Image (tube, helix red, strand yellow):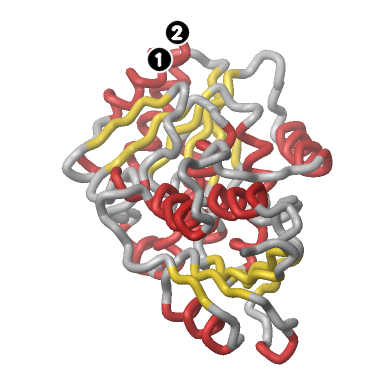
Amino acid sequence: MFENKRVVMVTPERLGDTLMCTPAIHLLKEAYPSVKIDIIALSLLSAEVLKNNPDVDHVFVRPELATLPSYDRGINIHNGPEAQHYLNALNAPLDTIGANDPHIHQAEQAMLFMQKLLSLATCSVEKNYRLFPNAEDYAHVETIFKLQKVDLKKDILLGCQIGCHSIAKKRFAFLKKLSHPKIWPFEHIVMLAQKLHAYNPQIKLVVTGSNSEKVLGKKLEKSAPNIVNFIDQTTVPQLYSLMKYLNLFISPDTGLMHVACASNVPLIALFGHTSLTRTGPYPKLKDLTLIQGPSMAAITVDEVFQAVVNKLAR
């Protein structure tokens, strides 16, 4: 079916949504090693997720249709109007994943779709997310640690994601209130940082986020003495590299949580109103603590602090 064929897929804008496509892309490549897979990425962030991915031949970022080669087949692996527009315009036979199923994890739905498309009785590959940092990515992370006077042999490094994709769209409204329903309240992060420092001065809180969270990072540095600021200083492969230096990672339902899942770092996942079934940690992690509340604000500092202490004790 796909032997020696040239296939194109469209990946979405968001980091997490693109990462959730990578196991299914890998399944296609494993089933048909001769297939050539091109990706149309709808953002630079999406393209970063696929950097160095051996399953992918070429990544185009929002290309002009006239610049694209001809394809034997298109696969709509993540439904969306813009993806459908690109694929329809290419005039290649098209397979579409269909409507989102709220009862199945997004990554799992993509895998099941690909498995059915390939007529496979069972899934023949591991379902892990796939990221491919290089030596330069690790060196970049170590340089930031060095500039911020982190001792990689002595300090206890706890990662913490303080924002989410939605903040960028509502940046000014967010900065006015410093709150968003998808993230843990900023004042909770400040209190956690202070409490962790009092518990053990060797603990450093390594905060991550995008350009939209730079102001929060600066505020946090002024509020607690144990902050290591990585906000807006890393690509996606570099973020994956960062996870390898951490003792654990704390995150709400964001793309960075899925990067943590890819790295197998011990994870404390915070969930409020978003769907754990649809976008929760995937696949099953060896070391996961899930804290879920009726809202993100309802998750207390003490709950997260105790989860950290328990993990460090192990």
Farthest left residue in view: 294
For the residue marked with disc 2, what is the amino acid? Ala
Kindly indicate the quadrant of the structure image that contains residue 292. Answer: top left
Secondary structure of the residue carrying tag 2 is: helix
The residue nearer to you, when weighing 283 against 227, is: 283
Q: Position of residue 33 (x, y in %)?
A: 73, 52
The residue shown at (71%, 33%) is 145
For the residue marked with disc 1, what is the amino acid? Val
Question: Could you tell me if residue 215 is visible in this image?
Answer: no
Q: Is residue 226 left or right of residue 145?
A: left
Q: Position of residue 174 (x, y in %)?
A: 36, 62
The residue shown at (35%, 20%) is 307
Q: Position of residue 82 (x, y in %)?
A: 48, 80
95 in relation to 86, above or below: above
> Do the residues bearing badges 2 and 1 touch, measured as CB atoms within 8 Å?
yes
Is the residue marked by circle 2 packed among few (<14), some (14-19), or many (20+) residues within 10 Å?
few
The residue shown at (33%, 43%) is 184
119 in relation to 124, above or below: below
Q: Which mark is residue 313?
A: 2
Q: Which mark is residue 309?
A: 1
Question: Could you tell me if residue 304 is visible in this image?
Answer: yes
The residue nearer to you, when weighing 309 against 15, is: 15
Is the residue marked by circle 1 packed among few (<14), some (14-19), or many (20+) residues within 10 Å?
few
Q: Is residue 137 left or right of residue 269?
A: right
Kindly indicate the quadrant of the structure image that contains residue 68. Answer: bottom right
Alpha carbons under labels 2 and 1: distance apart = 6 Å
The residue nearer to you, when weighing 169 against 37, is: 37
